């Protein structure tokens, strides 16, 4: 598998749209307009599955205007189609497992996923599909996999664990691992691609598969939109799907309507002080003390300023300041993360953060030109699943997994996503499913000990049981078939 994608980036930069319709036998480029910069070209290249040739099996199929299916409830796809999904994915499991292990061993943080993007392109190319698979009249359905990893040092001890550090643009090195299962998401997308090509006679419509970077920082989906995703000639979605790992038991899927995940903000607060010698603090305005006071004061926002029945989270993930034991630095940076379900609560959180910051700085003696600065780095609204889509896919998912394995009344969580941000401007209905990836015996042991899960996402011990690799691909395929199969 390739380590870089220079040739693909070059071909992306060199291609411009000539106005022709996208056809299944055409060499497609991720970039269909002149790029404003290398970064824009890189993002477009990474996000929209890179140039590949679609297998001739779909060539020449007429493409009708997208038609949203009725999505009637209580009508699962046929047992024969479920059996075909099982057989197709089972036959592909060795390949998918090898891809997953490779992705897990080579994680890449936000906006650096060049190697991962190349594997996505290679994997989809081998199945004969590109980002857009046109297979006759019917709805247009988009499926997403996010690619980025976390700055976490892996402690799983797996034989395919990520052990190497990642070198950043500033030459610094960080620990990095797939602690949120995005390696599984990418693998599931590749499994979906191969399955849908193999079953092309069983469905009709347009399927768009795409790999997104930078979900962890909450800006990847928005970067796609800002880089003219919807002006590049790709078919507009009638509906969209996303899947995510959770440390629930393998074989279970949460597929629930309504509000599923909280909105989020990433922000930095910079406190500016006056540095000096550690032995003469009276000559300084200590930003470390200001930052420490702010961290403690923030904890009263949720506990004392918000309605007790309102859900919100304010976490400080990092304090960056100073270096030497005997030097009081001149600045300190707090890296905050917010979770909320309504715009009103979000505004209340931000207002109180600003008030606390200014109050702490003024009390420390900071001048007006030294007041703390808040920098917003990324935001995403709450994720709200479409009821009609959930009702359309759940009967088929139950037929795939078994009775009681599809959780249709799972409570909303404080975790967040930016998947929905790609579709906000189009008002596209979507369904976002949570797929269990923990060994059932570990989950049962944790529950017996009074713990909700055996481990958590973003934890050094997080891992995806290999049994979940083919299962996620099957869930993807059955969800797609649930809305693309024409029932007679």
Image (cartoon, rainbow, N blue to C red):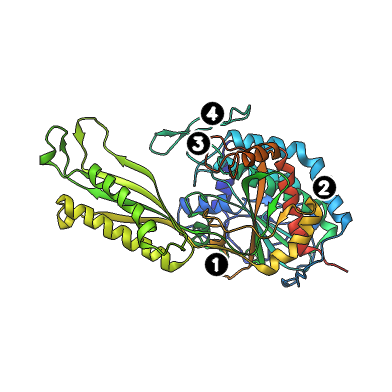
Relative height, residue 185 to residue 306 (above, below): above
Across and down, in percent, residue 149 comes to: 53, 42
Query: Who comes first in sequence, dot 3 or dot 2?
Result: 2
Q: Nearer the viewer, residue 429 or 61?
A: 429
Residue 13: give x, y in percent of width and height: 54, 52
- Determine if residue 442 is in view: yes
207 and 260: which is toward the camera: 260
Tell me the quarter of the image containing the C terminus: bottom right
Q: What residue is pinned by disc 1?
A: 424
Q: CA distance from mark 3 to mark 2?
A: 34 Å
The reply to whether callout 1 and callout 3 are in contact (CB within 8 Å) is no
- Nearest to the observer: residue 462 or residue 248: 248
Q: Is residue 287 left or right of residue 154?
A: left
User: Which is nearer the N-term, disc 4 or disc 1?
Assistant: 4
Q: In 3D space, how far apart are the residues under numbered discs 4 and 3 (Cα atoms)?
A: 8 Å
SS category of the residue bearing label 1: loop
Name the residue at 23% across, 57% down: 358
Q: Quadrant of residue 134?
A: bottom right
| Discs 2, 1 touching: Cβ within 8 Å | no
Label placed on residue 86: 2
Q: Which mark is residue 163?
A: 4
Circle 3 residue: 176
> Crowding at label 1, few (<14), some or many (≥20) Cα neighbours within 10 Å?
few
Is residue 54 visible in the rendered image? The answer is: no
Disc 2 and disc 4: Cα gap in Å? Answer: 34 Å
Please give left or right for residue 438 compared with residue 36 in the image. right
How many other residues sit within 10 Å of disc 4, few (<14), some (14-19) or many (≥20)? some
């Amino acid at each position: 598998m390739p380590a870089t994608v220079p040739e693909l980036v070059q071909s992306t930069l060199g291609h411009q749209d000539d106005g022709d319709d996208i056809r299944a036998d055409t060499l497609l480029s991720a970039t269909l307009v002149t790029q404003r910069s290398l970064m824009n070209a890189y993002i477009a290249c990474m996000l929209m599955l890179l140039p590949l040739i679609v297998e001739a099996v779909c060539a020449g199929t007429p493409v009708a205007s997208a038609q949203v299916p009725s999505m009637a409830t209580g009508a699962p796809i046929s047992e024969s189609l479920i059996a075909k999904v099982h057989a197709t994915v089972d036959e592909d499991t060795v390949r998918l497992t090898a891809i997953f292990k490779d992705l897990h061993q080579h994680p890449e943080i936000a906006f650096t996923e060049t190697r991962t993007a190349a594997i996505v392109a290679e994997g989809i190319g081998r199945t004969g599909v590109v980002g857009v698979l046109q297979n006759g009249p019917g709805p247009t359905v988009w499926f997403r996999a996010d690619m980025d990893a976390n700055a976490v040092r892996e402690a799983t001890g797996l034989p395919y664990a990520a052990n190497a550090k990642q070198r950043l643009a500033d030459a610094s090195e960080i620990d990095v691992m797939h602690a949120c299962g995005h390696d599984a998401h990418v693998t599931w997308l590749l499994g979906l691609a191969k399955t849908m090509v193999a079953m092309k006679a069983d469905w009709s419509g347009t399927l768009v598969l795409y790999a997104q970077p930078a979900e962890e920082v909450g800006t990847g989906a928005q970067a796609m939109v800002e880089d003219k995703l919807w002006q590049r000639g790709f078919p507009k979605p009638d509906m969209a799907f996303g899947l995510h790992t959770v440390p629930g038991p393998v074989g279970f899927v949460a597929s629930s309507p309504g509000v599923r995940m909280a909105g989020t903000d990433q922000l930095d607060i910079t406190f500016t002080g006056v540095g000096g010698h550690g032995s003469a603090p009276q000559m300084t305005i200590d930003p470390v003390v200001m930052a420490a006071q702010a961290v403690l004061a923030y904890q009263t926002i949720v506990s004392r300023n918000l309605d007790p029945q309102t859900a919100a989270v304010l976490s400080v993930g990092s304090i960056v300041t100073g270096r030497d034991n005997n030097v009081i630095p001149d600045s300190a940076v707090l890296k905050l993360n917010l979770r909320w379900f309504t715009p009103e609560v979000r505004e209340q959180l931000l207002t109180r953060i600003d008030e606390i910051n200014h109050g702490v700085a003024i009390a420390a003696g900071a001048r007006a030109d030294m007041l703390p600065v808040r920098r917003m780095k990324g935001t995403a609204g709450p994720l709200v699943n479409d009821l009609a889509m959930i009702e359309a896919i759940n009967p088929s998912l139950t037929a795939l997994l078994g009775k009681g394995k599809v959780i249709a009344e799972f409570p909303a969580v404080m975790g967040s996503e930016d998947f929905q941000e790609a579709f906000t401007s189009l008002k596209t209905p979507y369904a976002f499913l949570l797929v269990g990836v923990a060994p059932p015996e570990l989950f049962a042991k944790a529950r017996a000990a009074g713990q909700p899960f055996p481990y958590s996402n973003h934890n050094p011990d997080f891992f995806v049981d290999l049994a979940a690799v083919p299962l996620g691909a099957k869930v993807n395929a059955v969800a797609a078939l649930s809305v693309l199969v024409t029932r007679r």
